[in-house]
Image (cartoon, rainbow, N blue to C red):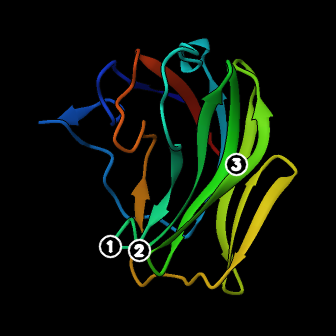
């Protein structure tokens, strides 16, 4: 198990070099792990953070062209997990389930016969049209799109 932390005002989890993640590496296109959110992942309800934060997954050379991962968002003090992927430059996202800090959840992101499959526990989403990239890269824990983390927050990840 490893704990990943995103510091207040940042997008990327530690460690970084000049603000860029040091988690770069090649990946399989089937990513499976357990995740546990810390209480600090639930940020203040008065702060409006549009869009999804991201959990680990994989990407082709262009993360906004061909990638697959789960996202997380806080709405009204409730932490939700959803699917989040790009297929040929089109983003697909939506809710899968509500989760609780301190509880382990099993996550999987894979390609099955041309479908992207994003799963947390028994909740999943299949989206047709995905493809297996020639080269896949690890995509790590990330906060925001345009917004940065309003406070320091951590998650635990255990590969399975």
2 or 3: mark nearer the eye: 2
Say left or right for 133 vs 104: left
| Foreground residue among 93 and 48 | 48
Residue 107: % across, % down: 70, 48
Q: Residue at x 75, y 55 (%)?
A: 119
Q: CB of mark 2 within 8 Å of CB of mark 1?
A: yes
What is the secondary structure assignment of the residue under circle 1? loop
Numbered tag placed on residue 65 in the rendering: 2
Q: Distance from label 1 to label 3 (Cα)?
A: 23 Å
Instruction: State the image quarter where residue 30 is shown.
Output: bottom right
Q: Earlier in the sequence, mark 1 or mark 3?
A: 1
Mark 3 lies on residue: 107
Q: Is residue 154 above or below residue 53?
A: above
Mark 1 lies on residue: 61
Q: Residue at x 70, y 35 (%)?
A: 80
Q: CB of mark 2 within 8 Å of CB of mark 3?
A: no
Residue lying furthest right? 122
């Amino acid at each position: 198990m490893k704990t990943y932390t995103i510091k207040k005002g940042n997008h990327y989890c530690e460690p970084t070099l000049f603000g860029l993640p040091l988690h770069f590496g090649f990946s399989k296109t089937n990513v499976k792990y357990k995740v546990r959110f810390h209480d600090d992942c639930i940020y203040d309800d008065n702060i409006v953070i549009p869009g999804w934060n991201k959990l680990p997954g994989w990407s082709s050379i262009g993360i906004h062209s061909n990638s697959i991962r789960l996202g997380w968002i806080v709405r009204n003090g409730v932490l939700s997990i959803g699917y989040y992927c790009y297929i040929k430059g089109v983003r697909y996202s939506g809710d899968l389930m509500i989760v609780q800090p301190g509880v382990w959840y099993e996550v999987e992101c894979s390609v099955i016969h041309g479908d992207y499959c994003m799963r947390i526990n028994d909740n999943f989403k299949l989206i047709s049209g995905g493809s297996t990239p020639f080269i896949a890269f690890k995509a790590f824990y990330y906060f925001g799109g345009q917004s940065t983390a309003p406070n320091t927050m951590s998650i635990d990840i255990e590969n399975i």
